[in-house]
Every structure is written in C-alpha cells, then in structure tokens.
Image (tube, grey):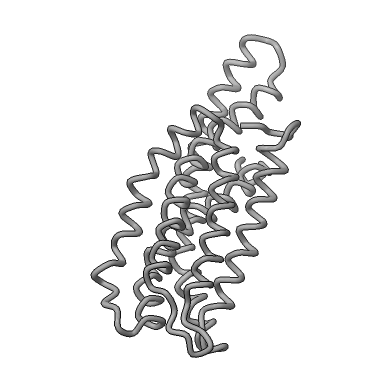
Amino acid sequence: VIFTRKHNWLMCWLYLGTFGSFIGYSAGLPMLMQSQFENVDALQVAWLGPLLGALLRPLGGWLADRVGGARVTFWAFVAMALGVAAVLYCLPQQGRGGHFAGFLAAFGVLFAAAGIGNGSTFRMIPSIFLTERQRAAGPLPAARAQAVKDANMEAAAVLGFASAIGAYGGFFIPKSYGTSIAMTGGPEAALLAFIVFYFTCIAVTWWYYSRRNAPMPC
C-alpha cells in the first residue's frame, strides 16, 4: 500500500538527500581528496566526517521532537547547499592550489547537516503517516484506533523502503565525482548538480511540510 502513498515518494526523495548524502560523501570523500589535493594523505582525515555525521544523527531526532522535524530538515538542506558551495570555493582551480583546511571544514558542515537531517527525516515519517491515517479515519474511536495501527505499519514499511532508496547515495555521489572528472577534468559539475538537488529538497520540505498552512505539517 505504501506505493500508493504520495508521502512515501516525497520522503524517499528527502531521505536520499540526508541518508544518501551521508553514505555517499563517506564513500566518495577519500577519492575526492586524493584527486584534488595530491599532497594530502586522505586516509588520515577522511574518517572524521563520517564520525561527525554519525555522532550528530541523534541530535537531529532530538531537535525534531522539540521544534519539528520539517523545520530541522529544511535548515539541514540549506546548510548542505551552502556546504557544497563552500567546497566548490575551496577546490584548486585556475592554477590556484585550493584551500584544504577550508575544504575539510566545508565537508564537516556537510556531514554534520546530513547527520542531523538524517535524524529529523527519520522522525518525520511516523508523524506524517499517523496524521494522514487519522485524518482519513474520521471521529469514531474504533476507526481512530485502527488508524494508529495502520499508520505504524505503513510508517515502518516506508522507513525500510526509504532507507533502501537512500542507500543509492553511496553509489551516485562517488560515481558523479568520477563522471564529472572524466568529462570536464574536475568535480565541479557534480557539485553543482548536488546544489540543484538540495534546492529541490528545500522546496519539497518547505511546500509540503514546513511552511505555514503546509498540507502535512510535522
């Protein structure tokens, strides 16, 4: 039944943006470092980003419980778009050697925002499906009790399915780096595409979940 639910597909898109970004950046960061900063031993520092994202994931869930998952997710995507822009600025280009410390700090922002956003999107899904099923149930107590059961079942299925979709980030992000470098000589095209993707996530989050009078506030 979840394949007929609009919010399943919307949350898959957002979960690809948070969880998918986390595992994709984890997989692709060493390659990106080695290709852009040849004098840096990527394996000495690349683990710091995934550690930061993993540690901050519970913070995303905690913030979602207190200020709303959609609000946290919205600002996480804003931070991720800005983080990618900072990565672009710090890359070597036009004979300039780049700024590795700034590059690493920008990826720190990306991992932190992805970890927090992962926690907040995870918390959004049960809230969305509970609200949706309760709206459809009407006022009768028996129908509302059944709605809670249905919502729990659907939310669990959506969490599993969205996690599977999000896992493709572990393929798409490193592949995007490689394709961009092969076609243009640098990763800039891939990073620009990531910014466009994050703008779509910001728009979806704002329109459906975080704006005033959103159809499904959470």
Q: Nearer the viewer, residue 9 or 61?
A: 61
Q: Name the quadrant of the N terminus.
A: top right
Q: Is residue 71 visible?
A: yes
Q: Residue furthest left?
A: 44
Where 128 sits versus 173, above or below? above
Where 172 sits versus 81, above or below? below
Where 41 sits versus 133, above or below? below
Q: Nearer the viewer, residue 178 or 42?
A: 42
Q: Residue furthest top?
A: 141
Q: Nearer the viewer, residue 130 or 97?
A: 97
Q: Name the quadrant of the C terminus.
A: top right
Residue at the spot 61% in from the left edge and 58% down from the top edge: 198
Residue at the spot 42% in from the left edge and 51% down from the top edge: 112
In the rendered image, residue 133, in percent from the top left (x then y), is placed at 64, 27
Q: Is residue 16 visible?
A: no
In the rendered image, residue 55, in percent from the top left (x then y), is placed at 33, 46
In the rendered image, residue 117, in percent from the top left (x then y), is placed at 49, 46
Residue at the spot 57% in from the left edge and 59% down from the top edge: 81
Q: How many marks?
A: 0
Residue at the spot 38% in from the left edge and 73% down from the top edge: 100
In the rendered image, residue 40, in percent from the top left (x then y), is placed at 29, 78
